[in-house]
Amino acid sequence: MIACNKGGRVVFLWVATALLLCGNMAAIAKDSKSASPKLSGVRSIDWSRFGNPVDSDLEAMRRILNTSLRYNTAWLDEKYPAAEGGRSCVVNLPTNGRKHEHTIRPAAVVADALAIALRVGDFDETAVGRSREECLNLVRRTIRGLASCHRANVAGENNSAASKEKHSGGGRKTPPVLAWGDHWQSAHWSSHIAMAAWLQWEELDPETQQQVLRMVIHESNRFLLPDYKPHLWANREKVLTPGDTGAEENAWNATILQIAVAMMPRHPMAQRWKESASSLMIHAYATRKDMDDLTTLVDGKPVGRWLQGYNAREDYAVENHGLVHPDYCSCFGLSMRSYLTQSLAREPVPQAAAFNAPHVYHMLTEKRWESPPHKQPGGTIFQPGKAELYYPNGTDWSTHRVLTYAHIDVMAYVMGWDRGRPYSARDWLRLRMQKASEMQARFPNGRTYAPGEFDTYPGAEQIVSSQAAECTLYLWLHAQDAIQPTANWLAAGSR
């Protein structure tokens, strides 16, 4: 177990990584204690161009967010208490790296949600139960605490294992060191920390800013290594991992690259980060027929030229944990986070961000699953007039995850995927927001789930805040016509 660490270790340098452009991939693993990423290279968000729009759906989602934060700010304050005189927080990091998820991820997503709420959430001190300044301090210390414990910022011999780890599986073989990172999911956690930091960048001290940048560069450059390959469910010849899509892993790995590009558009690796992000987002929900598509251009290249394999069935469903799993079908929302980061940066959204996402949403809303062979009563996964879902093979998580699907309803509504379809994404969004509000109304402390409703994942309550915050940000941008258009972000002249 450890408390927050202040480190002087710099794994990836803005100068040293330029060597990669000459093909020297070994430079990725080198570190230096004498240099730091350039703070001047971070793009600031121009908040002056945004207003405070009035929208009924936005207000309803803000209430859900503020209520959820009532529970999660108290949770964060208790589980990650102040350290360094309040500048950081204590992070009790297990020595077993495979257990880092339940230490880092929940705190990271709450910090991100709170940072969003403070910026665009019409922050309600009464609903949250804490002042704005208290919550801002909580964001600052959580960012510093989590980033300082990332292996990019931790000195010592144990940390050297990072450069020896096999990366083709996304860091699945995590060494037992007192630092986190290079984990199969750590790119995703890092992206939430980075988003929280970027949203409140001017509120952070320079040392914390440096730690965040080292973490972002380290996690992003993992996906530039020559032996890294996207996760695949199948290739041209066969299914490689039956019942185990790689869709969500590709999508969440892309999230760190999205925020890296938004924050550091002129970094020497920015173009390669974009290329890697596009590849991961396209691979996430590609189908077998996409491998043969040499006509459709996405981010400057035919779809088939991007692909080494695919992760979705021909009907756009994905299988995970041995099931046709709606929760993992919804993970296209991770790729769609490019719409948030690029819109805040006022840059075009990559065409890859929504690759096959409308098809997946239409599968959820319109494909009928017959019973038998599927569970009774059969029908569509999204149920007309209901917030709840039908799970064709059941679920090993929870049947109460209404905000998980409100999250993608927001995207479908904002992007207009329901135009000309026999349903309204906005109607489902409102049904699920109403259900979430009713669930929260059962508890005075702001929690959403009752015991037994979602006990299978330790960070369930924290994910509620995260999804409500991203929904709020989408609706806030949409209400003022600030969501950027898609384009080939790899084209010459794109930043």
Image (spheres, grey):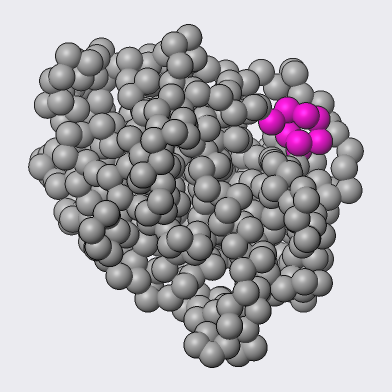
- The quarter of the rendered structure image containing the N terminus is bottom left
The image position of residue 280, as x and y in percent, is 38, 42
Q: Residue at x 78, y 60 (%)?
A: 423
Q: Residue at x 65, y 40 (%)?
A: 116
Horizontal side of 348 relative to 125 (left or right) equals left
Tally of marks: 0
Determine the image quadrant of residue 364: bottom right
2 and 366: which is toward the camera: 366
Residue 478 among magenta residues = yes
Determine the image quadrant of residue 376: bottom right
274 and 263: which is toward the camera: 274
Specify whether residue 243 is in view. Answer: yes
Q: Residue at x 44, y 11 (%)?
A: 492
The image position of residue 456, as x and y in percent, is 47, 76
Horizontal side of 435 relative to 229 (left or right) equals right
368 and 18: which is toward the camera: 368
The image position of residue 360, as x and y in percent, is 56, 56
Magenta residues?
A: 476-483
Q: Residue at x 77, y 48 (%)?
A: 419
The image position of residue 273, as x and y in percent, is 36, 28
